[in-house]
Amino acid sequence: MADACRAKLRTGIGFDVHPLRVGRGLYLGGVEIPHSEGLDGHSDADVLLHAICDALLGAAGLEDIGHQFPDTDPQYKGIRSTILLERVVELLAGADARVINLDCVIVAQEPKLSPHFPAMKQTLSDLLHLPQECIGIKASKPEKLASLGYANGISAIATCLIETAGQCHDT
Ligand code: MG
């Protein structure tokens, strides 16, 4: 076991992107947001929660969201990503890992997201058992550049710090 794996404090980073489609509900940070289109995917396609799941899993040295919840598995079809994040929290608890803080950026040309930040923070606080002061959510517009700028999709980036019991996970 390398010395670096014994570190009790570990960072994680996650990224996700999904296309926007007419006829889908838009879910971000576990909150349904009124919009003319929603993100398309096997689950509810909540890019923010998916990025957060990957940041947490990566920090704990666990396999990523695609391995934990394969999009080829029918049991995850249409599933709310809040349920996936709950399961990730359970995986972290099983690994003796505790989340210290979380910071995120949603990249979306539209809709305006800041009015929904309080509801997202409350949802994340409840799911992660973390004070809202330890959760950062920001939105950035892609300035009408490239595919995201044409409002064809939304992406999210998340970073986190966790504290572990100091044991490395053999994978
Ligand atoms: Mg995803």
Image (cartoon, helix red, strand yellow):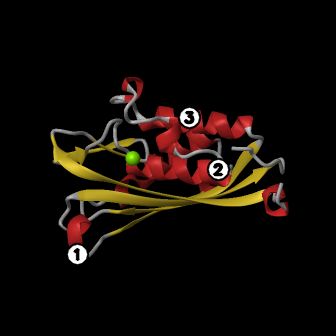
Q: Give the residue drawn at x 68%, y 44%.
A: 171
Q: How crowded is mark 2: few (under 14 residues within 10 Å), some or many (20 or more)?
A: some
Q: Residues within 10 Å of mark 3 (few under 14, many from 20)?
A: some
Q: Which of marks 1 and 3 is nearer the N terminus?
A: 3
Select label 2 or label 3 by which is in front: 3
3D distance between C-alphas at marks 2 and 3: 16 Å
Q: In this view, does 68 lie above or below 14?
A: above
Q: Which of marks 2 and 1 is nearer the N terminus?
A: 2
Q: Mark 1 points at which residue?
A: 145
Give amino acid for label 3: Glu
| Residue 136 visible, this orientation | no
The image shows a total of numbered marks equal to 3
Q: Name the residue under label 3.
A: 86
Select label 2 or label 1 by which is in front: 1
Q: How crowded is mark 1: few (under 14 residues within 10 Å), some or many (20 or more)?
A: few
Q: Give the residue drawn at x 35%, y 35%.
A: 43
Give amino acid for label 1: Leu
Q: Are marks 1 and 3 in contact (CB under 8 Å)?
A: no
3D distance between C-alphas at marks 2 and 1: 35 Å
Check the picture and name the quadrant holding the N terminus.
Answer: bottom right
Disc 1 element: loop
- What x and y, as percent, mark residue 50? 45, 47
Q: Nearer the viewer, residue 162 or 73?
A: 73
Give amino acid for label 2: Pro
Q: Nearer the viewer, residue 50 or 103?
A: 50
- What x and y, as percent, mark residue 170? 74, 44
Q: Earlier in the sequence, mark 2 or mark 3?
A: 3
Using the rendered view, name the quadrant where residue 38 is placed. Answer: top left
Label 2 C-beta lies within 8 Å of the nearest ligand 1 atom = no
Q: Residue 131 carries which label?
A: 2
Residue at far top of view: 75
Horizontally, is 74 left or right of 66 in the view? left
